[in-house]
Image (tube, helix red, strand yellow):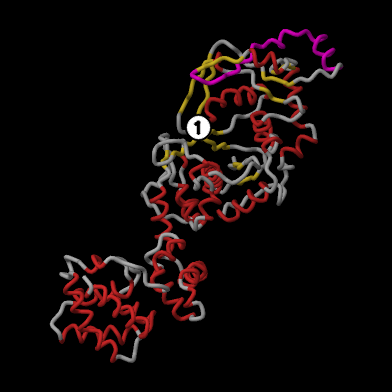
Amino acid sequence: MKIRTRYAPSPTGRMHVGNLRTALYEYLVAKHEGGDFLLRIEDTDQERYVEGAVDLIYESLKDAGLSHDEGPDIGGEVGPYVQSERVKSGIYQKYAEELVAKKEAYYCFCTKERLESLKQNIDGKEVLMYDKHCLSLTEEEVQEKLAAGVPHVIRQNNPREGKTVFHDELYGDIEVDNAELDDMILIKSDGYPTYNFANVVDDHLMGITHVVRGNEYISSTPKYNRLYEAFGWEIPVYIHCPLITDEEHKKLSKRSGHSSFEDLTDLGFLPEVVVNFVALLGWSPEDNREILSLSDLVECFDYHRISKSPAVFDYQKLRWMNGEYIKAMDPQRFYDMAAAEIKKAVPGFEGDEDKLRKIASMVQSRVELVSDIPEMIGFLEELPDYDTALYCHKKMKTDEASSAGVLKEILPFLESLEDYHNDALYAKISEWITEHGYKNGYVLWPLRIALSGQATTPCGATEILELLGKEESLSRIRKGAELLASK
């Protein structure tokens, strides 16, 4: 049996991290076994439809590297792949009426007011459990109402007694009391199928063998299975994934600002990093590797290793992972990606390609996001106001007094130098340090503080001297000496 999976999003906005994980796991389940991965657009909920969201789905999947084998944009043998187009062909109405004929479904003509009266408060939530009122209508009464155009829906006819057992690959056999199974609506009053009904019909007609979804759908699975059984169709393999929470163990919210794939790429996370990170939200490979390309994931993905415990979205780990990818990146690709941020931080350097590339090479191994760059290198454009306490460093054995002496002593030497390239500067300054009997840190620490006004910088003192040039460097060192002298 060839494995066939599908990603079936609703076009309601950006791709939530949970949806991305579902799409990724569906893709990996299929591709690990050489199967097919389909894309189906589930747009039956017209009230939630967002203009442009379908294009966003295509873009997100492309950016994530999840190429589908069949779908609305490329076709296939079991299309159409957009549910609203399938509605026009009458597929769902036909199958719903087949269930009515089998007594597995029935027409319901209840008014909104009557349905409201059936709602109960359970654990603080209003829950509607339909009372099968319209199931008692005679065939003649049903036909009269249909002929008169009375608004209606078609409901599934679920048993109220006994139990239903179904199997999940992660959770095993799950038993549900039939008393908990509501007679869910299959066809709405506007003629559109509900998500649940269209999902089952389409999965069968498209030959879907494995269904991956969040474990919030576990409670709906018995109703799905009763539909499969009523039609005499084969039930797919179910894989229900754990909830994704934030660091406070609450459901990941759209208000967090990083709950969607697009949110994260907008923040500067590499698409391949987001995919790698999301793959590990509830799953890990046998060798516990953390840095995995999409091809690595295809090779080693085993859905039996998906955890049942909630997965925590660790934002700091995502930043770390992005930094690891950046470190391993081709320098030209990093420069192309980072150039705009570098130029924004140091507009005075914009025309000097050599210096811009040197800055890029300095920060590449130190940044986790390219948006970190301006804060890291802004001192090159303008020396910030700083506290002279920065000159004090126990390990380097420096304090404000010793630093004042060092800057005053080395200033004439730096004024005498003409070659301000890093290698030449480092060699000359190292000689000066040795001749004066100092340790490197005792001189280079205060020199770097005077040049940058920062405790940490992406490069050392001589590299800063080269980037700033002789005139600006000497001006900053004089200012540092003056600040220390005024203490």
Q: Which residue is mark 1?
A: 215
Which amino acid lies under the numbered mark 1 shown in the image of this protein? Asn
Residue at the farthest left position: 437
Residue at position x 64%, y 13% in the image: 117
Q: Quadrant of residue 391?
A: bottom left
Between 153 and 205, the one lying in front of the other is 153
- In the rendered structure, does residue 24 fall within the stretch colored magenta? no
- From the viewer's perspective, is residue 424 above or below residue 454? below
Residue at position x 64%, y 51% in the image: 58
The x, y position of residue 268, in whole percent, is: 49, 58
The x, y position of residue 280, in whole percent, is: 43, 46
Residue at the farthest right position: 147
Between 348 and 99, the one lying in front of the other is 348
Between 151 and 67, the one lying in front of the other is 151
Residue at position x 62%, y 38% in the image: 208
- In the rendered structure, does residue 143 fall within the stretch colored magenta? yes
Q: Quadrant of the C terminus?
A: bottom left
Residue at the farthest front position: 486
Q: Quadrant of residue 308?
A: top left
Region of the chain picked out in magenta, as a range: 123-147
Element type at mark 1: helix
The x, y position of residue 448, in whole percent, is: 29, 74
Q: Quadrant of residue 326?
A: bottom left
